[in-house]
Amino acid sequence: MSPITPNNEIDRYAALLDEARRIKGVSLAKDAWRRLQRNYVAMGALVYLILLILAAIFTPLLPLQSPIEQHLQPAETDKKGNPALHGQFLPPRAVAVELGLDDADRTRPVYDDGQEGDSPFEIRLQKLFAGLGWFDRMLVETRLAVFGDWCIPSICGTDNLGRDVLARLFWGARISLMVGFVATLVSLVIGVSYGATAGYLGGHIDNIMMRIVDILYSIPFIFVVIFIITILDEESIRGWLDARGIDRIVVFYLVIGAIYWLTMARVVRGQVISLKNEQFIEAARTVGASSRRIIFRHLVPNVLSVVIVYLTLTIPSVMLFEAFLSFLGLGVTPPDISWGVLAQEGIRVISPVKIYWWLIVFPGLALALTLFALNFLGDGLRDALDPRMKNR
Amino acid sequence: MIFLLKRLGWMLLTLWIVFTVSFFLMRSVPGGPFQREKSLPEDVKRNIERRYHFDEPLYKQYARQLWHTVQFDLGPSFKLQDYTVNEIIAQGFPVSASLGVLAMTFALVLGLTAGVVSALWPRGFLDVSFMTMATLGIAVPNFVLAGLSIIVFVFLLQWFPAAGWGELRQTILPALCLGAPFAAYIARLSRTGMLDVLGQDYIRTAYAKGLGSRRVILRHALGGAILPVVSYLGPAIAGILTGSLVLEQIFALPGMGSHFIEAATQRDYTVAMGMVLVYTSLVYVMNMLVDISYSVIDPRVELK
């Protein structure tokens, strides 16, 4: 029997420490990421979504045709030798198209009265891409430097006004995705603060707040939203909103976001209530963790995983709702483009005379693929963030 | 009984909230129906406004309209001549209702069959093809589906007429397109439910006491397997109402959805508001029926 000497004691602790050092702590995020990586479908969806978002942000950089200019297609003659229409309803094809922007004169003409006008380059640019911000303009300039006048041919065909469907799909992705993300963000802010408040306060207030959610749940919101959008569209109200810099799309974000927060509020409230009484919170308090540490190390990550999962599942339903309203002519309206608007334009020109399948198939495909990807990613995240799966 | 009364109470409360919000939204829009008539002399205009009580304080107008609405009188249309809101709804409702019922039947029959068949031979050829179709059906928006099926079935194959209302043949395509996403969802739900149930002890007991597999599946398993489907029916009905907005537009059906969209785009506020009230009560009643049927199928569930 060896006597416990101070030296011995130190050795023992050193060994313990050494062992502890060898076991690596795995954070929830790292663990979840590892599990997500093994889910090939979800990873595929994630890669697709990242590419789509990048493509949407950098759309002006891509060598696409103009989404609005109607006379880009090379002039053609029909069988009788008459000049054909300006490339309307062309099926997918691979004929080269030029922007006619690279060689345009950039010097500004000076009129007799000494005032400067817009240069031919500027006029052409406005015709091809109206209303560019400084960022988009910079991208267009870069694109001109890299690709020159060359454009991707109309591999998705052209629409009833001769505009390139592929370019419109990419420009439409910007608005569709933007509506999806921003409206979801609005719903996130409302839902999380409402749910967390109700769950945290508990008692009567919680009861009343959740009753209100119940009532709102049973209202078929799409009809109410259509009603509200109609009223907000009345000229005088329109003018009032415009004067304050709130345009139609912003109203749209707010209205959609304001109705999609209900489930989020319920989920967050449930999570907060169950966490409040969890043992590990008590344990953390017992070992003397500060409430800041408890909130940020224990509460937020646990609520966050649920919120992230629900977020990825809300975005597709919001995007679908946007497409739906735009389809009915109550959401995004031309000249703005979204995928819903494109699908609507495709279905409007259906006729028995000639079948313009590409006007429906490509917008539909873009929508369906994106909704697919978001749903798969949401499912994958739900599995990956499940704490019961930890270290497996 | 108490359950019904309670639900009815909540429904009335909800309807009242919807009514109040829409009433004040409507009145916050400047320009009533008579203010567009610029040619009207001032006195005539005042007389008309008095006739329709536009000169009264807002709370009186509110009370009056609430009283009318309680009596199911939704007032005249703002835009369509000679029509009251009630007449418009009465005209559109049968069309929408038959479309919805047909779509729901399609969704249930197709979805349940596909789901149960898939669950009986999991990972078989039928299972894989049904579930691939179901995944597709959930992601493709119904207006895209409608557009494609018009191209394929109406113009290429010429099986169905393009639009219109009256014959059964004209109803089938819109109802199929409307029901498809829900059929897909029901197929997935019933497959999962069926697989769950088939693994349970009482199914093994049923087999062990010598029952044939058809009897086990139809009598014992199916009841348990459709529970998740029944609880999905509530959202499905709301979804079908929403979907019919778009499909009635595409197929030019004279249903409530078409009238509602027209009212919304034409700013026909009374019609739009009446429709919102009708839709709300419809969804409420349907949900109530679903809850009741749920408790009939599953005796463990108690109505509260």
Image (tube, coloured by chain):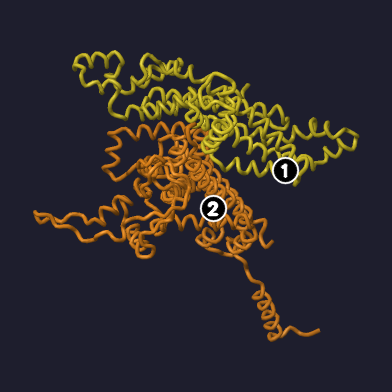
Chain colours: A orange, B yellow
* Lateral position of residue A249 relative to residue A177, left or right: left
Q: Is residue B58 above or below residue A277?
A: above
In which quadrant is the C terminus of chain A drawn? bottom right
Name which residue lies at 60% across and 49% down: A274
Q: Nearer the viewer, residue A321 or A9?
A: A321
The x and y percentages for residue A225 are: 43, 34
Under mark 2, the amino acid is Ile
Alpha carbons under labels 2 and 1: distance apart:
32 Å
The x and y percentages for residue A95 are: 43, 53
Residue B127 — which label? 1
Q: Nearer the viewer, residue B303 or A286?
A: B303
Q: Is residue A55 above or below residue B240?
A: below
Q: For numbered disc 2, what is the local secondary structure? A: helix
Q: Nearer the viewer, residue B131 or A106?
A: A106
Q: How many marks are shown on the rendered structure?
A: 2
Mark 1 chain: B
Under mark 1, the amino acid is Asp
Q: Does residue B100 appear in this view?
A: yes
In which quadrant is the N terminus of chain A drawn? bottom right
* Lateral position of residue A31 relative to residue B95, left or right: right
10 Å neighbourhood of mark 1: few (<14), some, or many (≥20)? many
Name which residue lies at 66% across and 31% down: B108
10 Å neighbourhood of mark 2: few (<14), some, or many (≥20)? some
Q: Does residue A201 appear in this view?
A: no
Residue that carries the numbered disc 2 in the rendered image: A308
The x and y percentages for residue A341 are: 43, 41
The x and y percentages for residue A280 are: 62, 58
Q: For numbered disc 1, what is the local secondary structure? A: helix
Q: Is residue A49 above or below residue B118?
A: below
